[in-house]
Amino acid sequence: MAKITIDDKEIEYSGTPNLIDLAKENGIDIPHFCYHPALSVSGNCRMCLVEVGTPVRNRETGAIEKDPEGKDVVNFMPKPQPGCYQTPADGMVIKTQTDRIVSARKAVLEFILANHPLDCPVCDQAGECVLQDYSYQYGFQESRFSEHKRVYDKNEISDVITPEMNRCIHCDRCGRFTEEIAGDLAFSRTWRGNRTELATLPGEKIKHNYQGNMVDICPVGALTLTDFRFKQRVWFLRYGPSICTTCGKGCNTVVWYKNEDIYRIKPRLNKEVNSYWMCDQGRLNYSYLNKGRKRSHSVKGNKVDVQEAVVSAAEILKRASSVGVLASANESLESCFALSRFFREVVPSSNIDFRIDEAQMNDNRKVRDGELLWAYDPYPNSNGARKAGLLPAAGGMTAKDLLQQPEKLDVLVVFADDKLLAKPDVQTKIGKARQLILFSFLETPWDLQADVAFAIKAHTESAGTFINIDGISQQFEPVLQLESAAQETWRILNSLAEKFGKGFGYTSIQAARMAIQ
C-alpha cells in the first residue's frame, strides 16, 4: 500500500482519496468551507491550505536523501496549496499546523469575515456553524475592516428555503449541488468579484425536490430551512438515527427532537441507499408524528389496558368464521412476520393483503421519473411485507376487496397508518365492517366504533427492520419514547397468540428477528 505522512503521522492508503477525507479518517482535521465529498472540487475558499512536499531523491541512486539526524530531506512547494485539490501520492509529506499555514488561514478568515454580519445570536446555524468554530480557532477579537459591509437585497428564492444572503461566504456548495446532484440550473453564482451573489433567475424559484440538502451543506446560515426557522436552538435538541418512511427508498435519517416533539429530520450518510441526501418529501413529512398520536388501547371506545384489549380481541377472533386483514407495509419486517404467522397458524385466514397503493399492486420498485430518491411506492417495507407472505391465498380477498366489501366478513382487522388515513374514501368503507379490530399509532375516525383498538408504536419509538425497493435490509432502533401505553405490533400479536395457547415466545426484538425465515 502507498504511504503518506501528515503532521509526522505515517498513513497507509489505497486508491486515490482526497487529502481532506484521508486526513479526517485518521483524526486530522483540515478546516474547509467549499469542499464536500459528494461534490466537484471548487477550491475557492482557500481555508484548507496546507504545506505539500516530497522527499528529495539522489539523482544517481534514486535513494531518499537523509539529513544529519537521519531524517528524510523533504522539498516543500514554495507556496501553501489547497488541500482539497491534493491527490495523495506515495511518499508525500503534508503539514497542516505550521506557523505559516496558521497565519495563512487567519488571513483567509479575515477576508471571509469582512462582509459577514455579526448576527450569530439570531442565526439558525448557531451551534452548527463551522465559521463560528474556525473564528474561535483562527479569528481576531477585533476586525480591521472599517468600510460598510456588503448588503444584498432579500429575494424570495424558494418555498422551502429562506435566504439570508448577507451571511453567504460564496463557497458555492449550493450551486454545485443544484447542478451536479439535483440536475438543475435554478441556482448559481452571478456577477463577479465583490458583487458575486448566489441567486436564481429574476422572478424564478428553485423547484427541485432536494432543496433541504442545500441548507444542510451550507456551512453558514445563508440558506435556512423555512420549516425549522426560529423553532429551536439546536443545543436544546436531542437526536438519533432512523429510517425515512415516506417512500420505499428508505433513506437513512437523523431525527432531531425535544421531549416528545420532532423538530426536523436530516439525512444520514449511507452510500448504498441515499448517499448524503434525502428528498424534501421525506424531510418535511414528520408533523403526523407530533399530533393525533394514539396513546391508549380501547374496547368499544372505552379506555382499557393492553391485556384487557388482548382478551377482547381474542374472544372476537375465536367466535369469527371469516376474518380479513388489511395489513400495512409501514410495519417492520418483524411485525409483518408475526402477523403472517398469526393469521396462518393461529387464526387461519386467506384474506390478507398489504397492497393499498397502485405501486404496491404493480410491484413497482422504481424511483419516480426525474427523481433521485423519491420512489413510486409510498411504503418503506413493501418488500418485507411481500417476503412475510402478507398476500391473499387462492380465492382470498385482496386489499381492494376488503375495502369494497368489508361487511362480507365477520371481522376486519385493519393496520392503519398515515398513508391509509390520508385516503378520503377509506373512512366510510372501513366503517361498514361488522366487527373491527384496529391497530394504529395515530388516532383514527374508527376509534370509537372499533370493537378493539390497539395503540402501537411508530417507527421512531420502536426497533425493527425495513427492506427497501432495492432489496437492502436496514435495521432501526428507537429514537424517542412517548408517555403512552402503546406497544410494538409484534408484541401484541404474541400476546394474542398466547390467548390461543400458541404463543410465539417473542419477548424481545431479537427473539422476533430470530423467528424470521
Image (tube, rainbow, N blue to C red):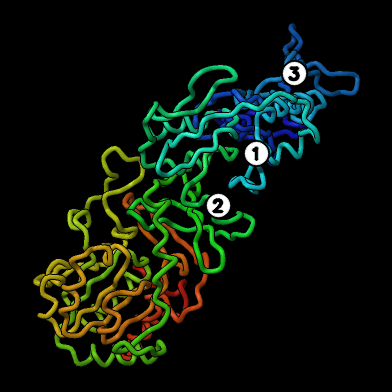
Q: Position of residue 356 (x, y in %)?
A: 21, 63
Indicate which label's residue lies in the foreground, 1 or 3: 1
What number is the disc on residue 55?
A: 3
User: Can you say which quadrant of the picture contains the C terminus?
Assistant: bottom left
The reply, left or right, for residue 495 in relation to residue 77 is left
Q: Nearer the viewer, residue 251 or 261?
A: 261
Q: How many C-alpha atoms fall within 10 Å of the one at disc 1: few (<14), some, or many (≥20)? A: few
Check disc 2 and give the amino acid type: Phe
Q: Position of residue 90 (x, y in %)?
A: 65, 24
124 to 258, vertically: above or below? above
Asked if the residue at tag 3 contacts the one at tag 2, i.e. Cβ–Cβ closer than 8 Å, the answer is no
Q: Nearer the viewer, residue 508 or 296?
A: 296
Q: Nearer the viewer, residue 498 or 2?
A: 498
Check disc 1 and give the amino acid type: Lys
Q: Residue at x 50, y 41 (%)?
A: 215
Check disc 3 and give the amino acid type: Pro
Residue 275 visible in this rendered orientation of the protein: no
386 to 35, vertically: above or below? below
Q: How many C-alpha atoms fall within 10 Å of the one at disc 2: few (<14), some, or many (≥20)? A: few
* N-term-proximal mark, 2 vs 3: 3
Secondary element at image label 2: loop
Q: Position of residue 166 (x, y in %)?
A: 58, 33
Secondary element at image label 3: strand
Q: Residue at x 34, y 58 (%)?
A: 380
Distance in Å between CA atoms under marks 2 and 3: 53 Å
Asked if the residue at tag 1 contacts the one at tag 2, i.e. Cβ–Cβ closer than 8 Å, the answer is no
- Return the residue found at the far right: 68
Q: Which residue is mark 2?
A: 230
Q: Which residue is mark 1?
A: 24
Q: Position of residue 238 (x, y in %)?
A: 59, 60
Q: Residue at x 43, y 51 (%)?
A: 283
